[in-house]
Image (cartoon, rainbow, N blue to C red):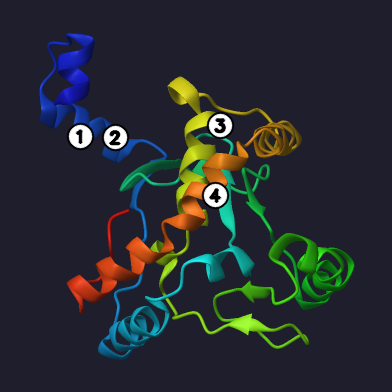
């Protein structure tokens, strides 16, 4: 109905639905994030209670996360249309920070370990959800809690700059280049503000107790 109104088309909604149903394009519902079980909520609350008194300590944490970027825009929509004729013709998405276990160990040994103390100080700690022990001191992060990670907000900033006015990319290489360009000009103060939001995030968890997530 919104599309019809926007285009000022005098077409019955049922007619549009019939045409879409007969087309090779299929409507899929985006997967929802996994719901928190009671033990997840308990772990979040315990984590928040344990670290609520932290302030400058967060400056010693090296945060990490991964993000999926698509050629045709951000992946936050609830529904999308998929043309079955184009399936498997080309790669259309790119994961920032992706790789197998050997790649991950190589990233840690070649990049994270050498600069860890420079970035987070002599007592630096690595943050990673579901982290496997590779000889690095890690923060015991609760599972299914991306809303506690300030990098989630950073992804939002990057997506906003990456897809202005519905911008789309023609190739993975073009997408990678733009991601690196945006990443390289992120403001340091903006990153500091996100890290400094950690005490407030934990306070929201304590206040909401068994909520599925916090808004930040």
Between the residue at mark 1 and the residue at mark 4, the CA separation in whole angstroms equals 49 Å
Task: Look at the numbered disc 3 and give the secondary structure of its residue.
Answer: helix
Mark 1 and mark 2 in contact? Answer it, CB < 8 Å.
Answer: yes
Q: Position of residue 167 (x, y in %)?
A: 52, 24
Label 4 crowding class (10 Å Cα cut-off): few <14, some 14-19, many 20+? Answer: few
Q: Image quarter for residue 23? A: top left
Between the residue at mark 1 and the residue at mark 2, the CA separation in whole angstroms equals 5 Å
Please report whichever mark, 1 or 4, sits nearer to the chain's N-terminal start. 1
Question: Relative to residue 84, is residue 108 drawn left or right?
Answer: right
Between disc 4 and disc 3, the foreground one is 4
Between disc 2 and disc 4, the foreground one is 4
Between the residue at mark 3 and the residue at mark 1, the CA separation in whole angstroms equals 32 Å
Please report whichever mark, 3 or 1, sits nearer to the chain's N-terminal start. 1
Residue matched to label 2: 20
Residue matched to label 1: 17
Q: Image quarter for residue 126? A: bottom right
Mark 3 and mark 2 in contact? Answer it, CB < 8 Å.
Answer: no
Please report whichever mark, 2 or 4, sits nearer to the chain's N-terminal start. 2
Between disc 3 and disc 2, the foreground one is 3
Mark 4 and mark 3 in contact? Answer it, CB < 8 Å.
Answer: no
Please report whichever mark, 4 or 3, sits nearer to the chain's N-terminal start. 3
- Mark number, residue 192: 4
Q: Position of residue 171 (x, y in %)?
A: 70, 33
Between the residue at mark 3 and the residue at mark 2, the CA separation in whole angstroms equals 30 Å
- Mark number, residue 162: 3
Task: Look at the numbered disc 4 and give the secondary structure of its residue.
Answer: helix
Question: Relative to residue 199, is residue 149 drawn left or right?
Answer: right
Between the residue at mark 4 and the residue at mark 3, the CA separation in whole angstroms equals 21 Å
Please report whichever mark, 3 or 2, sits nearer to the chain's N-terminal start. 2
Task: Look at the numbered disc 2 and give the secondary structure of its residue.
Answer: helix
Of 146 and 83, nearer the camera is 146
């Amino acid at each position: 109905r919104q599309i019809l109104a926007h285009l000022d088309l005098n077409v019955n909604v049922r007619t549009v639905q019939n045409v879409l149903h007969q087309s090779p394009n299929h409507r899929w519902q985006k997967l929802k994030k996994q719901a928190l079980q009671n033990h997840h909520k308990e772990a979040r609350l315990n984590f928040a209670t344990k670290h609520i008194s932290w302030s400058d300590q967060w400056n010693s944490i090296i945060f990490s996360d991964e993000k999926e970027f698509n050629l045709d825009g951000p992946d936050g929509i609830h529904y999308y249309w998929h043309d079955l004729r184009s399936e498997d013709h080309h790669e259309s998405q790119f994961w920032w920070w992706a790789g197998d276990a050997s790649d991950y160990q190589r990233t840690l040994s070649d990049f994270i370990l050498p600069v860890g103390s420079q970035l987070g100080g002599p007592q630096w700690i690595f943050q990673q959800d579901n982290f496997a022990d590779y000889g690095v001191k890690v923060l015991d992060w609760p599972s299914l809690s991306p809303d506690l990670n300030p990098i989630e907000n950073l992804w939002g900033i990057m997506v906003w700059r990456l897809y202005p006015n519905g911008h789309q990319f023609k190739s993975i290489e073009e997408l990678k280049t733009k991601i690196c360009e945006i990443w390289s000009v992120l403001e340091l103060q903006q990153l500091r503000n996100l890290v400094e939001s950690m005490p407030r995030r934990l306070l929201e968890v304590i206040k909401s107790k068994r909520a599925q997530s916090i808004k930040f």
